[in-house]
Amino acid sequence: MDAAVDAGTGQFELTEGQRAIQEMAEAFAADRVAPNALDWDRAKHFPADVIRETGPLGLGGIYVKDDVGGSALGRLDAVLIFEALARADPAFSSFISIHNMAASMIDRFGSDEQRRRFLPKLTSMEWLASYCLTEPGSGSDAAALKTRAVKSDGDYVLNGAKQFISGAGDSDLYVVMARSGGDGPKGISTFVVPKDAPGLSFGANEHKMGWHMQSTRQVIFEDCKVPAENLLATEGAGFGIAMAGLDGGRLNIAACSLGGAQSALDKALAYTAERKAFGSKINQFQALQFRLADMETELQAARIFLYAAAAKLDRKAPDAGKWSAMAKRFVTDIGFDVANQALQLHGGYGYLHDYGIEKLVRDLRVHQILEGTNEIMRVIIARSLIGRQ
């Protein structure tokens, strides 16, 4: 389902189907997410029941093939969905993105038997999924991971720990990268680990700056037995599987930043139209008008950039990886900056939880770190540039 793209201007005209997808996601978010977002944040509540409501809408397997219940949509379609959900709650949207990344790995790299065994329950959201790559001692240097998988009696035994795992303890399946061979990326394999696997446990829920509605825990493997039939693809393919999921994940998290920042700008526009100072509504002061104009311009530039990157990934363009990295870096930086400026425009009220602005600032800050830090995005972009000279 491709949007019309003018190669000269980069302008997008969404198809009728894409507009319908966008409106569906916006309606669900406005009805079921937005009214609860502040309460979930305050209570640090993981709303599994509302997350599962997205399954019948086709959001449990957005780009999973339809023979196992997926929606078989494209990456631009997914960006529209995550942007719409994030206008209600970036943390909620981000978890849906993580679940979809895990499901898509099984769809792309799993056998027919694995796809039939796992994906119908993931696409329906009966099961929730988490993605397990980062470890206490390896973040950006993912190829240095230490969690080990040793073959024993025809199965695998995992030992180690994963860090900063969204949904840990609440999700039903964990797509786990573990070292089954020697050092380096070629020694890494990917396993699908069910929550009830013997030897699997979880750390305490982390106290975080933002994303309070998501549980974030260590995932701990202590002689954790995983059936051999839960190995995705082949031994040694795990690092490639992990990296293959990240281009799309970077676009998704950028979309979550974009939606959250749009919400912040909308709140700032409404507040400055009501708040008075020195006898006038504050949106009548030119300095404030210029700030609003810059926020709008930067968001629209970020939106076009993100949509263009998503269209490249849909087309499997040779430079899609570079564009995904550029979009992730640019959009998440812009998103945080716009939300932070919106807080400033609210003055002291922006610092209060009930206005919703400080939550957006907290939630969007982590987007500059996860799915590869923005410093790593610069490394990827620079290598792409230098490599072609």
Image (cartoon, rainbow, N blue to C red):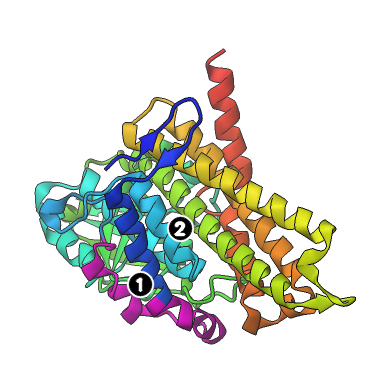
Q: Which one is nearer the viewer's eye here, 94 or 144?
A: 94
Label 2 amino acid? Glu
Q: Is residue 125 left or right of residue 290?
A: left
Q: Which one is nearer the viewer's eye here, 172 or 250?
A: 250
Residue 83's mark?
Answer: 2
Report x, y in % for residue 164.
50, 64
Q: Quadrant of the N terminus?
A: top left
Q: Residue furthest top?
A: 389
Q: Is residue 331 left or right of residue 176?
A: right
Point out the stretch of residues depicted in magenta: 31-60
Report x, y in % for residue 232.
23, 48
Q: Is residue 168 visible?
A: no
Q: Is residue 306 left or right of residue 106?
A: right
Chain-order first, disc 1 or disc 2: 1
Q: Which residue in the structure is indicated by mark 1?
A: 28
Circle 2 sits in a helix, a strand or a loop, which is it? helix
Label 1 amino acid? Phe
Q: Quadrant of the C terminus?
A: top right
Q: Identify which residue is drawn at 47% across, 82% down.
A: 35
> Is 293 rendered above or below residue 91?
above
